[in-house]
């Protein structure tokens, strides 16, 4: 029960981190610089926590050589997922940018659990678990896109497909497949970091290593792309909270490192997804973090309920 609560809490924090990093991106003028700052702050926070836990900030080269190479790639996978969302948004629009990576996360989570990949606890894929996963995906779709569907049916608005010009159908399918792949890499990161925590004997140190690898990867990206820095105050105000996205991201990774050995990758991914949907609805309902208020509808609550039913099927049947 505690593991489920932790999954929900870190999931709720994820859309808050996204909103915070979006504000930081607007202030710095570059999504890559914003990601680098966010990862850097998270890395510093986890480094301090690692030292408090009486752990070294360095891992010996011989120890690294004894482990499979993929064990150290969790942070890089996180950067690819983050960058993938940045690329996908103008290509697919906000609705599909959520749905297709979620599909990838669920698929990869179930496969990782079924085969015990990356030393995750084995939980065989059955028809019942598959049905539960489909219900979770359906719930996500209804929660994210349900209102747009209703508006389209009633003639009030069109369902968003892309933000600007719609690309050719073949290109659109490729971007959707890329979204699924990005989601699969996100679930893989969860599994990899979970095993890293077991190998290092410290969940905090594992989260620190993952964030450090992510930060180093972003440094390389920034050095190659050389994005220009144009700090903008935005009406003369710079909210203090735009600097804490990295802390929420650090807690998210740390929570996943804790969850995987206990409940498995697939179930951890799904619980976090429910928390993510709850957090998104809370932000919309109350207009947190300077976002516009969009009152939650009964249709969205119904989608959330479908997700909960799917989780109950996966967990209890």
Image: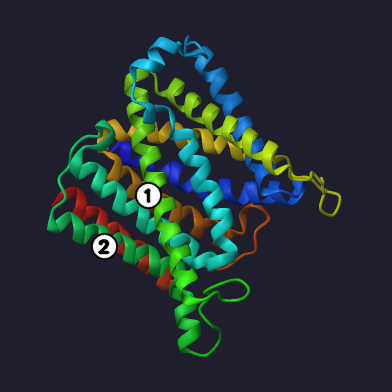
Q: How is the image coloured?
A: rainbow
Dot placed on the residue nearer the N-terminal end, 2 or 1 = 2
Disc 1: CA contacts within 10 A as few (<14), some (14-19) or many (>=20): many
Residue 184 bears which disc, if any? 1
In the depicted structure, whether residue 45 falls above or below residue 314: above
Looking at this rendering, what residue extends furthest in the bottom direction?
155
Q: Is residue 135 visible?
A: yes
* Residue in the image at 50% along x and 79% along y: 159
Q: Position of residue 278 (x, y in %)?
A: 44, 55
Q: Position of residue 316 (x, y in %)?
A: 16, 49
Q: Which residue is mark 2?
A: 134
Q: Is residue 256 left or right of residue 309?
A: right
Q: Which of the two marks, 2 or 1, is nearer to us in this view?
A: 1
Q: Secondary structure at mark 1?
A: helix
Q: Position of residue 94 (x, y in %)?
A: 54, 65
In the depicted structure, whether residue 291 falls above or below residue 109: below
> Image quarter for residue 143?
bottom left
Disc 2: CA contacts within 10 A as few (<14), some (14-19) or many (>=20): some
């Amino acid at each position: 029960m505690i593991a489920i609560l932790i999954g929900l809490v870190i999931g709720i924090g994820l859309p808050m981190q996204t909103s915070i990093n979006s504000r930081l991106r607007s202030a710095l003028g570059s999504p890559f610089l914003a990601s680098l700052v966010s990862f850097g702050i998270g890395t510093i926070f986890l480094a301090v926590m690692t030292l408090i836990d009486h752990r070294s900030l360095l891992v010996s080269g011989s120890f690294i050589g004894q482990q499979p190479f993929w064990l150290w790639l969790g942070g890089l996978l996180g950067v690819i997922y983050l960058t993938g969302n940045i690329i996908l948004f103008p290509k697919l629009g906000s609705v599909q940018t959520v749905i297709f990576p979620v599909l990838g996360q669920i698929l990869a989570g179930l496969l990782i659990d079924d085969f015990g990949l990356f030393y995750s606890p084995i939980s065989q894929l059955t028809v019942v678990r598959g049905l539960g996963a489909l219900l979770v995906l359906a719930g996500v779709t209804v929660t994210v896109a349900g209102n747009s569907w209703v508006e389209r049916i009633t003639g009030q608005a069109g369902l968003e497909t892309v933000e600007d010009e719609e690309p050719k159908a073949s290109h659109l399918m490729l971007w959707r497949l890329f979204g699924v792949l990005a989601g699969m890499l996100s679930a893989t990161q969860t599994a990899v970091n979970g095993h890293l925590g077991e190998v290092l004997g410290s969940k905090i140190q594992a989260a620190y290593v993952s964030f450090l690898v992510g930060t180093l990867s972003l440094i390389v990206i920034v050095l190659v792309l050389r994005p220009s820095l144009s700090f903008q105050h935005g009406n003369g105000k710079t909210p203090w909270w735009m600097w804490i996205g990295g802390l929420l991201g650090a807690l998210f990774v740390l929570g996943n490192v804790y969850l995987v050995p206990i409940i498995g990758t697939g179930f951890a991914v799904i619980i976090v997804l429910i928390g993510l949907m709850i957090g998104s609805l809370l932000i919309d309902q109350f207009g947190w973090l300077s976002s516009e208020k969009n009152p939650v509808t009964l249709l969205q609550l119904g989608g959330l309920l479908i997700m909960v039913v799917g989780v109950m099927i996966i967990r209890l049947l």
